[in-house]
Amino acid sequence: MSSPLIILGLMIILTFIGATGSLFLKLGSKNFHLEASIKNIMLFIKNWHVILGIILYGVSSILFIIVLKMTDLSIAYPMTSMSYIFVTILSYKFLKEKINKYKTIGIMLIIIGVALVKL
């Protein structure tokens, strides 16, 4: 097992990268039409937002594999819930989504939960 601070740092980095990937996938989905045509699928695949989102997900997954080598799955996996915090913040900042009191309470509970898992 490795240092808890290194694991926590890697988890913060990988969840932020994954959340940023989600943001780019959301941005890429704005021009995607649900009609299943080759043209629409090709436009979606060639969209730079989508490409960057997939790359960021891949980087996040590689970092998660590194973390799994360093600690137990039962510790690492619950810590991925930190991505909800980053997604909420990024959605507010870049997509102008609202943060209500329930989301705020949920974020606080996630932080408490992550802290408890590490005990």
Image (cartoon, helix red, strand yellow):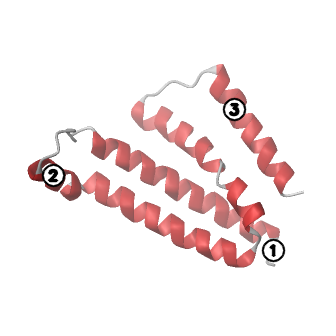
x then y, percent, for residue 90 = 49, 41
Q: Quadrant of residue 6?
A: bottom right
Q: Earlier in the sequence, mark 3 or mark 1?
A: 1
Label 3: element kind: helix
Q: Is residue 48 left or right of residue 54?
A: left
Q: What amino acid does circle 1 point to? A: Ser
Vertical placement of residue 108 versus 10, above or below:
above
Q: Quadrant of residue 100?
A: top right
What residue is drawn where x is 76% and y is 72%? 71
Looking at the rendering, in which quadrant would you find the C terminus? bottom right
What residue is drawn where x is 12% and y is 47%? 37
Q: What amino acid does circle 2 point to? A: Leu
View extreme (left): residue? 39
What residue is drawn where x is 30% and y is 54%? 50
Looking at the rendering, in which quadrant would you find the N terminus? bottom right
Label 2: element kind: helix
Q: What amino acid does circle 3 point to? A: Gly
Vertical placement of residue 58 versus 37, above or below:
below
x then y, percent, for residue 75 = 77, 62
Between tags 2 and 1, which lies in front?
2
Q: Earlier in the sequence, mark 2 or mark 1?
A: 1
x then y, percent, for residue 4 = 81, 68
View extreme (top): residue? 101
Q: Which residue is mark 1?
A: 3
Q: Which residue is mark 3?
A: 106
Label 1: element kind: loop
View extreme (right): residue? 119
- State how far apart marks 2 and 1 are (Cα): 44 Å
The mark total stands at: 3
Q: Quadrant of residue 68?
A: bottom right
Q: Which residue is mark 2?
A: 43
